[in-house]
Structure formats: structure tokens, C-alpha cells
Image: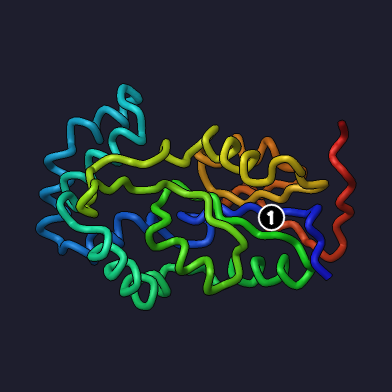
């Protein structure tokens, strides 16, 4: 039976996937030459982000503007379908897909929370049974062209918790599981009752785990 009081929130890049899926998506979509050109054009922002002088979301938008700018929403949705059907499948970690299935079999609600674009994460997540995708969203103009900006803030760090809390409002979970791999998942892990960060130990067992309600 479904237990709506238990939620499992999964990061995608580095957690379910083996690498940064956005870089792979862009390279597959525009080719290596345009990918490299985009990185060069956006390098002031990318270097600034590496030095913590520029917001990560601003740098990411600059790279996507330089590499994907001018493509229409319809074109990008076609690109996303091809990516999900092919290259993305080769990036998935079998043990994490098994963990997703385990949560589903126990009736838990599962949600994907990622800084990568919902453009391709939504169709993939729907295919494996995620209830929702909370992600970075691209902005399009009145003619349906990608503007080079985001429709919402980059879904990273504190923004992940904000999105989660808005999604489940007004009924927070009795128990929250969180799965991540990096600094961008720190706040989500801190918000969870049970958190796992890649590189910090084995996946916690679920069947034998006591999941008491969060203290008020």
C-alpha cells in the first residue's frame, strides 16, 4: 500500500547517474565543436563560479546560452527524447535504480530533485515511476526560443529544500529520505530523517530500518 507520509528525495547527477548529465546532453545535442565554443564563451562566468565569485546558476545559464541559445522548445524536447532513449541510459547506476524500485515497492512517494533541466529529467523520471521532478527549468520567449535564462532559480543547495517544502505543502512527510552526492545536496540531507551521500558509506538498509516520525 502507498504510504504518503514517507518521501524519498533523490538527486540525479552523480547520485543516480555516473556523471554530470547536463554536459553529456549538451554535447550530444550540439556536437563537440559547439560544446567547446560554448564553454569558451562562457568561461568568464564558469571561472568566476569556480572561484565562488559568480553564482552557479548564473554561470550555468551563460554556458547554456552560448551552447543552446536560439534553439526552440520543440527542438530541445526532441533532443531530450533522443537523449533519454539513448545516451542517458548508459549513465544510470543499477544499484540506485534498484533503490528507487525498493522505495516504490514499499509504497513510499519518490521525487527527483536536481539542478539539471527538467527538459529531459521529466520524461526519464516518468518512465521509472517518480511522482514529481523538481529541477532547473529553461525559459522560452513568445516564439518558443530558449532565452538563455532560467524560469526559476537553479535547483541547487538551499533551493532544493525550498522546492521540496513547496511541493509537499501543507502536508510535510512523517519521514524523509534523501540521496545525494555533493555539496549541492547538503541542505536536503540536513532536512532529511535518513540521508545518504555518495562516498560516505554504504546505502542504508530499508527493510530493517525503523522510521520514527520527525520530532516536532
| Quadrant including the N terminus | bottom right
Tell which residue pokes out farthest to the bottom in this image: 85
- What colour-coding does the image apply? rainbow
Query: Vertical placement of 194 versus 80: above or below?
Result: above
Q: Position of residue 169 (x, y in %)?
A: 69, 41
Q: Position of residue 119 (x, y in %)?
A: 38, 59
Query: Vertical placement of 84 versus 147: above or below?
Result: below
Query: Vertical placement of 70 versus 97: above or below?
Result: above
Number of marks in picture: 1
Q: Position of residue 22 (x, y in %)?
A: 34, 55
Badge 1 local density, few (<14 within 10 Å), some, or many (20+)? many
Q: Position of residue 49 (x, y in %)?
A: 31, 30
| Quadrant including the C terminus | top right
Q: Residue at x 23, y 32 (%)?
A: 45
Tell which residue pokes out farthest to the top in this image: 53
In the picture, measured across the screen, residue 147 lies left or right of residue 200, that is left
Question: Mark 1 — residue?
Answer: 8
Q: Residue at x 52, y 68 (%)?
A: 93
Tell which residue pokes out farthest to the front in this image: 142
Q: In terms of depth relative to the viewer, which is nearer, 134 or 199? A: 134
Q: Residue at x 27, y 48 (%)?
A: 140
Query: Vertical placement of 20 versus 39: above or below?
Result: below
In the picture, measured across the screen, residue 125 lies left or right of residue 75, that is right
In which quarter of the view is residue 192 placed? top right
Q: Residue at x 58, y 58 (%)?
A: 132
In the picture, measured across the screen, residue 106 lies left or right of residue 144, that is right
Q: In terms of depth relative to the viewer, which is nearer, 186 or 203? A: 186
SS for callout 1: strand
Amino acid at each position: 500500500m502507498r504510504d504518503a507520509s514517507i518521501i524519498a528525495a533523490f538527486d540525479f547527477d552523480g547520485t543516480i547517474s555516473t556523471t554530470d548529465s547536463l554536459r553529456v546532453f549538451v554535447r550530444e545535442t550540439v556536437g563537440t565543436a559547439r560544446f567547446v565554443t560554448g564553454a569558451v564563451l562562457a568561461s568568464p562566468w564558469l571561472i568566476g563560479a569556480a572561484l565562488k565569485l559568480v553564482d552557479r546558476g548564473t554561470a550555468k545559464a551563460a554556458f547554456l546560452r552560448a551552447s543552446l541559445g536560439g534553439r526552440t522548445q520543440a527542438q530541445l524536447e526532441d533532443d531530450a527524447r533522443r537523449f533519454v532513449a539513448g545516451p542517458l541510459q548508459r549513465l544510470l547506476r543499477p544499484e540506485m535504480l534498484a533503490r528507487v524500485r525498493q522505495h516504490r515497492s514499499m509504497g513510499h512517494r519518490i521525487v527527483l530533485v536536481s539542478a539539471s533541466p527538467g527538459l529531459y529529467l521529466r520524461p526519464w523520471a516518468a518512465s521509472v515511476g517518480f511522482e514529481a521532478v523538481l529541477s532547473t527549468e529553461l525559459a522560452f520567449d513568445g516564439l518558443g526560443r530558449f532565452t538563455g535564462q532560467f524560469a526559476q532559480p537553479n535547483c541547487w543547495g538551499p533551493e532544493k529544500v525550498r522546492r521540496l517544502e513547496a511541493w509537499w505543502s501543507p502536508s510535510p512527510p512523517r519521514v524523509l529520505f534523501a540521496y545525494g552526492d555533493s555539496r549541492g545536496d547538503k541542505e536536503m540531507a540536513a532536512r532529511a530523517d535518513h540521508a545518504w551521500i555518495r562516498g560516505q558509506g554504504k546505502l542504508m538498509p530499508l527493510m530493517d530500518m525503523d522510521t520514527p516520525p520527525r520530532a516536532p
